[in-house]
Amino acid sequence: MPLTASEVAAFRATDKRQNKSCGDSLVLVVEPISKGGGKSFMGVTRFPPRSPKNGGKRVEVRIGPYGKGVGKWTLKQARDEWDRIRAWSKEHNRDPRELKKEEKATPVEVSQGPTLSEVCESYCSASTNTTIDEYRRILWGEALPRLGGALPVAHFGWDHKQQGGRTGRDVVMSYVDAVTTRAPRQGEKVLMVLRQVFNHAIDKGWLERNQNPALNPMSKKPKATATPHATLPWDALPQFFSDLEDNHANASLVLLGAVKVVCMTFLRVGSLAPMSWDEWDQEQNLWCIPAERMKSRQDHLVPLTDPLVGVLEQMHRINGDTPFVFSSPRSRTTAHINPYSINQHFIRMGYKGAQTAHGLRRTALTAGQDVLGMPSEVIQRQMAHAVGDKVRQAYDDSALLDERRKFMVAWCDALLSQGLIV
């Protein structure tokens, strides 16, 4: 008879190595006392999946050590993992041992933002569903430990590559499939709860609209629609800046400073939030952003205007003894403010669906031409957009820095005239 969870926990080592069946070709391996008596799980199968007479060879796949906690496996978790490995081997017609090797060799994409556990807590706290206690048991009892609750929720996007090249969709559906194999109705419920959690992340702006990995198994990935980022019309900015200054959302001075800088520079939040003091060239009056933080993967220069310098000087009075301009003790994942916090502040201000940080780039390009009469090429250069065809991009090394500085001065002055206070 296969071992039960309680029998696995109670099983003791002897002076010999023992292999005990846990069912479905999953084996509990118990080392002899002389080697520490440790317990671990191993899957046993044949590959190619034929009988011994037809050439299939016995293959042993190590799952991991028995126990609870990081890097250890309960009986239930080991069974789910063994189901996943066998399903992968069958689908790809590959030796099951290759899956672990492949997952170790593939680099992981790095993302920031709230973790899956934090999103689940946010979802449960906001829910008025009478079955929320049951949802909590599903999430914290099994889903988060198996999926990785400490990972940023962005790592579970449909297309995001996790360890081993598996996408967020692969990870979520592999877990749901394992639950469904064991208990079909429970699998449906788990999928439903996860789908709602990821929809909550999308509503909060923590996950892209077309990246929910917990859609129904027969669903195709939804096509991304070309929806412009939300941005206010030019004549609505005075009220926006008034609300920003009133600060009913109770933002810190550092976050308010970051919001003002993003308004004046229209940079992507991922480029702005990690700004360090050594990027400020006071002699040239420039902010030099390194290539690794730019979407273009090229160094980017931001001419600094008097209002921008005013905000930076205020930040220096607060954070001058730290490496980052926007250092924040509130951030859980980085020493500086979380890039997501800027858009979250817009939501707390009451501008959900009306204004985003990225939408400010649209404002700058539109109002820069219509209100300030500046050439679009100058504005796009300051936005770090590629200008012209590939031939021009290959041969034109001009930075138009003087023209860009004139635009930045005019742009910041225009924002001040609309009510921005520095």
Image (spheres, grey):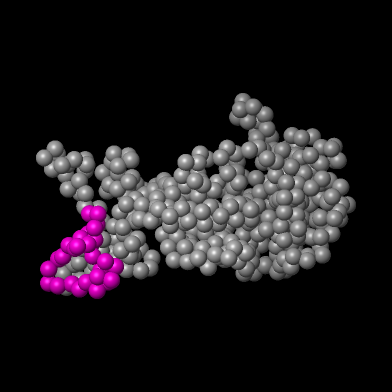
The location of residue 222, given as percent across then percent down, is: 56, 40
The location of residue 178, given as percent across then percent down, is: 37, 53
- Residue at (20%, 73%) from the top-left corner? 12
Residue 390: image quadrant is top right
- Residue at (58%, 65%) from the top-left corner? 130
Looking at the image, which is closer to me, 55 or 197?
197
Looking at the image, which is closer to me, 215 or 280?
215
Residue 50 lies, with reference to residue 118, above or below; the image says above
Q: Is residue 142 left or right of residue 326?
A: left
Residue 366: image quadrant is top right
- Residue at (64%, 66%) from the top-left corner? 328
Question: Is residue 18 inside the magenta stretch?
Answer: yes
Regarding residue 280, the answer to whether it shows in the image is: no
Question: Is residue 215 inside the magenta stretch?
Answer: no
Looking at the image, which is closer to me, 103 or 121?
121
> Which region is colored magenta?
1-28
